[in-house]
Image (cartoon, rainbow, N blue to C red):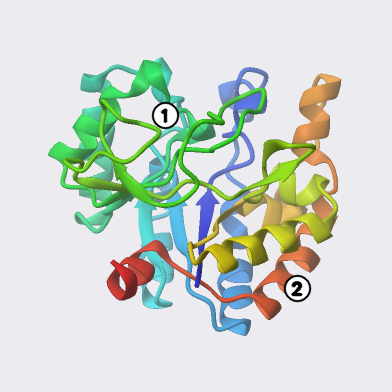
Amino acid sequence: MNILGIDFEEWFHPQLIQNIVKNEQKSFRVVRGIDKILNFLSKHDTFATFFVVGEIIQRYPEILDKIISNGHEIACHSMNHSRLDSLNSQQFSYELLEFAKLTENRSKGFRAPTFSLNDKSSWAIDVLEKFHYLYDSSIVPAKSSLYGNPNASVEPYKISSKSLYGNDENGKIIEFPLMVTKLFGKRFPAGGGFFLRTLPFSITKKAIKEYEKMKIPSTFYIHSWELTPEHMPRIKLPRKAGFVTYHNLESVMNRMDELLSHFQFTSFERYIQKNI
């Protein structure tokens, strides 16, 4: 069984857009695609974990009930999609407290914006423990320009602030690292998002099969705006940022449709209940 997380965020939340868009331009649009996403998952009889940015729930509290009433899980993706390494422990604690109030303490999982859990933000694990979180999914066991550590474990492990990338028997939180693959002898991110849009689709499917052979879950992610490109405005970005953000967006639904048709996915919550 594989795990599906949907990073439910607005079009202006991605790091490559945040520094360019001014506050007065930040209209909420992607949230309109919630029914489309829920219907898509229902079509495939698939449950997912929605890592929601808190300010979306603040403005649209009905989103919470829609997700949960359809059998999916709510998890935390911060309040405003700020990188963990731009915060301190007090600020992060405040965010978790606000998210808990918004969701009535229903969140037991966390994913750092832009997978920004790293050596500079390792203190976040201690904060998650204080708030009784059960799992995290912020580690990518491969290096990209924005995140990742190629030395991290590829299978779920107990994480701690002293051991971010490998098992700590005393750890209280389960880490679910994102799926990777090997290309030219090196690890390469393959767990969704930009890499689903850019890698040859055969590589993505092969990676999932390899994880199934190893009997570990492939942890896969996709953004809400990738599933609803009709609500994603095309703004002028630097060339590289524009490529990463918009390349092949129109392919996502077809590729996800094929993945959910050929492989079994579930939410983190349901996976933990059945396997851990």
Q: Quadrant of residue 97?
A: top left
| Residue 199 point in image, percent of width and height | 81, 47
Q: CA gap, disc 1 to disc 2?
A: 31 Å
Horizontal relation, residue 11 to residue 217: left or right = right
Q: Quadrant of residue 185?
A: top right
In the depicted structure, whether residue 146 falls above or below residue 158:
above
Tell me the element at label 2: helix
Horizontal relation, residue 139 to residue 128: left or right = right
Horizontal relation, residue 175 to residue 56: left or right = left
In the depicted structure, whether residue 155 falls above or below residue 214:
above
| Residue 143 point in image, percent of width and height | 62, 28
Along the line of sight, the residue nearer the viewer: 163 or 118: 163
What residue is pinned by disc 2? 258
| Residue 168 point in image, percent of width and height | 25, 39
Q: Amino acid at mark 2?
A: Glu
Residue 110 is at least partly visible in this image: yes
In the depicted structure, whether residue 268 falls above or below residue 40:
above
- Asked if labels 2 and 1 touch by Cβ distance under 8 angstroms, the answer is no
Q: Amino acid at mark 1?
A: Leu
What residue is pinned by disc 1? 117
Q: How many C-alpha atoms fall within 10 Å of the one at disc 2: few (<14), some, or many (≥20)?
A: few
Residue 34 is at least partly visible in this image: no
The disc at residue 142 is none
Quadrant into which the C terminus falls: bottom left
Tell me the element at label 1: loop
Q: Please give the name of the residue rendered at 20% of the width and 32% of the height, measured from the top-left corner.
A: 127
Q: How many marks?
A: 2
Q: Please give the name of the residue rendered at 54% of the width and 45% of the height, measured from the top-left corner.
A: 9
First in sequence: mark 1 vs mark 2:
1
Along the line of sight, the residue nearer the viewer: 187 or 255: 187
In the depicted structure, whether residue 132 falls above or below residue 207:
above
Q: Quadrant of residue 270?
A: bottom left
